[in-house]
Image (cartoon, rainbow, N blue to C red):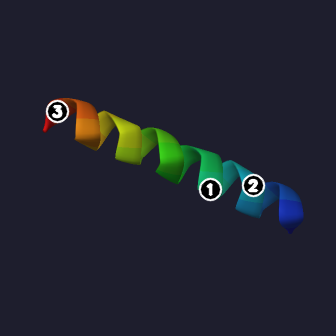
Amino acid sequence: NILHKNTAARYISRLSAAVKAMA
């Protein structure tokens, strides 16, 4: 499902940004 992949990618991107902010 493309929509699911898009949502997952957005979630991962947000999580990565949060990790960078912590570091």
Which residue position holds label 1?
9
Q: Please report the residue visible at 26 percent of the width from the left and 40 percent of the height from the top.
A: 20
Q: CA distance from mark 1 to mark 3?
A: 20 Å
Q: Nearer the viewer, residue 19 or 1?
A: 19
Q: Kindly give the residue lying farthest to the left in the view shown.
A: 23
Q: Nearer the viewer, residue 7 or 19?
A: 19
Is 1 above or below relative to 10?
A: below
* Among the two numbered marks 1 and 3 on one chain, the one whose residue lies closer to the N terminus: 1
Q: Nearer the viewer, residue 5 or 17?
A: 17
Q: Please report the residue visible at 86 percent of the width from the left and 69 percent of the height from the top.
A: 1
Please rate how many residues cluster around mark 1, counting C-alpha atoms within 10 Å: few if below 14, some from 14 to 19, many from 20. few
Is 4 above or below relative to 22?
A: below
Please rate how many residues cluster around mark 3, counting C-alpha atoms within 10 Å: few if below 14, some from 14 to 19, many from 20. few
Check whether the beta carbons of the residues at disc 1 and disc 2 lie within 8 A of each other: yes
Which residue position holds label 3?
22
Q: CA distance from mark 2 to mark 3?
A: 24 Å
| Mark 1, secondary structure of its residue | helix
Would residue 2 be found to the left or right of residue 9 on screen?
Answer: right
Say what amino acid the circle numbered 3 marks. Met
